[in-house]
Image (cartoon, grey):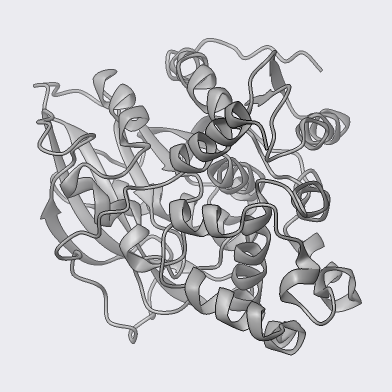
Amino acid sequence: MPLHRLRTTLATVAALAVSLAVPAALPTRAAAAGTDGTPGDIVTSAPTSFHPLPGQPTNTRAWHITYRSTTAKGAPNVVSGTVIVPQDGRTGPRPLVTYAVGTVGMADSCAPSAGFPYGTTVEANLIQQLTWRGWAVAVTDYEGLGTPGDHTYTVGPSEGHAVLDAARAALRLPGTGLGPDTPVGIMGYSQGGQAGSWAAELHDSYAPELNVKGTATGGVPADLLKTADFNNGNIGAGLILMAAVGQNAAYPELHLERYLNDRGRSSVDFLKHHCVVINGVAGLFKRISDVTVKNPLYEPDWQRVLRLSQLGTHAPDRPVYLYHGAIDELIPYAVGKQLRADWCAKGATVRWTSLPLAEHVVGAIAGSVPSADWLAARFAGEPAEGNC
């Protein structure tokens, strides 16, 4: 393997991750019991802090929260997250962005809320750009990442519910200055792009009361089967088994354990206890056949469930800014283009941006400011123009 490719590979994995350092303590969790209530209701809240880098001060106030949400099957659950509000003296209304992070790993210590107080959550630097604009930000940890149970990684409906309910919780949290009429934007990239896009598709049926102005998502794994095929034996191979674990967490009737060989069982245990830097490197260039006695992804029950996370079957009811790196090495460019085509065919207002010469991490960085600028125009009441 050429040295420059190895460096690119390691940089790609590292940039998607939280720091390898495990925080000394995690924020208080909600109890596993007690899921009566309405999605978005706050179960617990406690002061926390938001630091993009270790020790870096920010002029913000932050809360660690647990809040009620909904599983992929429609059952009530409890999810954790963080609400961040700039302390800029603003007294009037301010927008809220419900922000979905990219892949961080499977262990609770990988959760965004666990890293914010220590400056070890990589995307905190992108989130800080939003607080500089005077926007409040709600960041979900997703189901099972920071709360009991396995993380439902890549399970679209679960992620979409968690993103929308994080916004609901932020609006209900005392002391934020936010309220029911607060304009809301949805943002995310990579796994966060999947989560944010699912939130966009679910808005009209699940949380229509939210005053959503638009969604900006990039590097979206809209089709999990095509994404898995693309990564099988390549640099993103470790993410395939993580996704299988996530799907099995949401749909235990899939019985992932029946398909795993000894190496696969050991790998799953490893994945559940580490963050994406280690998981990604450990899985580099592996094939599904290395960890299974039979590939589950082509079994009818697995295909049915994976199609339940496929995007593009319902048009978002608010405009979307969708972007993708043309040489993305983790999420196929064709998958992003197909999502645009599917949404356009269903009448959605989509502003598509192709990022030439951008691979996955460069796409995240290159798309961050233009997507925020696009959201700013929506918050300002400017009409959205698509380019379907």
Q: Residue at x 79, y 36 (%)?
A: 339
Is residue 319 in sight in this rendering? no
Closer to us: 1 or 59: 1
Side of 52 where 256 appears, left or right? right
| Location of residue 268 (image quadrant) | bottom right
Rendered view: 247 above or below 117: below
Q: Position of residue 63 (x, y in %)?
A: 18, 51
Is residue 370 in sight in this rendering? yes
Q: Quadrant of the C terminus?
A: top right
Q: Residue at x 57, y 47 (%)?
A: 191
Closer to us: 151 or 4: 4
Q: Residue at x 89, y 75 (%)?
A: 299
| Location of residue 348 (image quadrant) | top right
Q: Position of residue 96 (x, y in %)?
A: 35, 34
Closer to us: 28 or 242: 242
- Which residue occupies the extreme front position in the image? 2
Side of 88 where 81 appears, left or right? right
How many numbered marks are there?
0
Rendered view: 39 above or below 93: below
Q: Residue at x 68, y 40 (%)?
A: 330
Q: Quadrant of the N terminus?
A: top right
Q: Position of residue 301 (x, y in %)?
A: 85, 78
Q: Position of residue 147 (x, y in %)?
A: 35, 72
